[in-house]
Image (cartoon, rainbow, N blue to C red):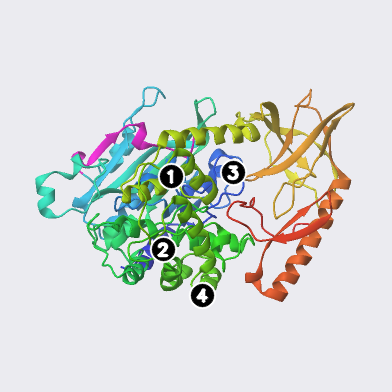
Amino acid sequence: MTSREIRQKFLDHFAKRGHTIVPSAPMVVKDDPTLMFTNAGMNQFKDLFLGNRPAKDKRIADTQKCLRVSGKHNDLEEVGIDTYHHTMFEMLGNWSFGDYFKKEAIQWAWELLVDEYKIDKENIYVTYFGGDAADELEADEETRQLWLQYLPAERILPFSRKDNFWEMGDTGPCGPCTEIHVDVRTAEEKKAKPGRDLVNNDHPQVIEIWNNVFMQFERKADGSLHTLPAQHVDTGMGFERLCMVLQGKRSNYDTDVFQPLIQPVSKQCGRKYGATLNSQPGESRYRHACDRRSPARDLVRHCRWTIAEQHGRGLCDPSDPASCGAIRLQLPGLHRTFHACARGNAGERDGRSVPGTEEATWHHRERDVGGGEGFSAYAGAGHQAFGASPLGEPPRGTIPGDKAFELFDTFGFPIDLTQLMAREQGRDVDMKGFEAELQKQKERSRAATTVTTGDWVDLAKGETTFVGYDELSSPARILRYRKGERQGGDQFQIVLDRTPFYAEGGGQVGDQGWLINGDERVEVLDTKRENQLIVHFTKALPKDVNASFSAQVDASRRNLTARNHTATHLLHHVLRKQLGTHGNRRVHWSPRTACASTSVISPRSRPRSSRPSSAK
Ligand code: SER
């Protein structure tokens, strides 16, 4: 089966079982301050698990673009070094929102793997949650019993919270999980050591392919677990790993997901890419190159997807990769246009499979003729700062911490990349010095951003009615609030049952105004979205949180905002008309000065998420 057929079979399997197929959410998370990048398929459904809004479809399936480069789920260190970790990957998932639970999830997973994909059941091992004393949770015996219908007891293994209790982040929905592992070793290897001894043991051919999470709890900011109003299923299967298993390969990079990227690069470098791990110096670089990493600073697959996403939102210019914050990876034997060459050959494949990438791919291909000089110039500056010309002799000695930090901060080199480049020159990086600089920067930014947010205090049930297109003032009650800390001071976040406040979005700033109760006027400093919630930010909490308020938008500020937003749309329209959609630029505007200007996004000034829209 080709990777395309594998993906389709998954979606068809769940469509036949009553699931609605939905598109992947963007990788750059828009409305959830607890998360920068989408790290799991369930992110876009967080509100449904928490019961913040009802699910329209009780059963959903999709393939989600995920990025694991920071926070709780971070695979940055593993990329390219082994054959089965990626920072950017596709996750095939099926969900039940208060509908089916463990029995059906396990049964349908088994039917897909064994009956449809024809994986030999002798090669399958499963794990389940073995309980946790600190969280006062028992072992998940129900799941073990369900698996016993399909597998002998010696293939059903208990593991601790670390491996078998899934959490999205420090807070949020979570629950015990059961993972499905596949042993793709040779018969001799299996004879020498049973697969059960290698499960969860970092063996490249005995790997987890599918995680089935049973969402039952919410982890609160104080670490406690609260039972969710309903029980849900959240599953995630690693698409690239599944392709490795089904295509009979020993490395994800040998599948048709990666080879169309690796082969042209390898050909242009004049080197043969071997399938065996680290069989030749620099081979991990090819894998690095074809992984799909951080939107701020990484390579081919990620660049194409992220650029396409950002382009779709009018945030960057895909004909100029440098404007989207990419860096070039130095490959043995290749000193230029690596980025362009891989794009040109493999773009169409992903373009068809990942919605939204087609347009950007076309721009890249047109631009490839020119060799991507803008991109190279940017990367070249980073390389010069590193201290080695790609063509010249490398210098010697330890790279000082402040220099490594400058590479990180100014040129977007992740520290692991600096270390990798240093290692290949036989050099060290002064990590202590780097950490010290990083710490200083963290302290600087901590002083400038929100540090903590407490749990919501619910006062009433219900959803917010937004009336801000027609009204600038409305009676309102508080549905929920929470306390946070910002720049050392208190900050409150308030959700109302009815609001005229427009939340930042669509390229338009959030409204300011007041919550008024008699003589008391609580100033609303900003309005933002968090998933489906419209959150009003205030410095103080009203004295009586259960009162009926008058929620009033600052009308003169809103008028300036509306004028500027309209002017922005007019400007965009003219730019598109005159230059074509690829001539898109982000438009900066200010409600105070009532003026608009355009500029290209530079790698150092990544925009806040915004999409030119029809917002009034
Ligand atoms: N949320 C789980 C994971 O990411 C299952 O989808 O592994």
Q: Is residue 116 visible?
A: no
Which residue is nearer to you in this view: 540 or 364? 364
- The answer to whether mark 4 and mark 1 are in CB contact below 8 A is no
- Residue 296 belongs to magenta span: no
N-term-proximal mark, 2 vs 1: 2
The amino acid type found where label 2 is placed reads Asp
Give SS at disc 4: loop
Decide: few, some or many residues near mark 3? Use Cα within 10 Å; few <14, some 14-19, many ≥20.
some
Which residue is nearer to you in this view: 604 or 61? 604
User: Which of the 4 image quarters holds residue 270?
Assistant: bottom left
Q: Which residue is mark 2?
A: 12
Decide: few, some or many residues near mark 4? Use Cα within 10 Å; few <14, some 14-19, many ≥20.
few
Q: Is residue 465 visible?
A: yes
Q: Which residues are magenta?
A: 152-170
Q: Which residue is mark 4?
A: 370
User: Which of the 4 image quarters holds residue 4?
Assistant: bottom left
Q: What residue is rendered at 48% in x and 59% in y?
A: 380
N-term-proximal mark, 4 vs 1: 4
N-term-proximal mark, 4 vs 3: 3
**CA distance separating discs 4 and 2:** 42 Å
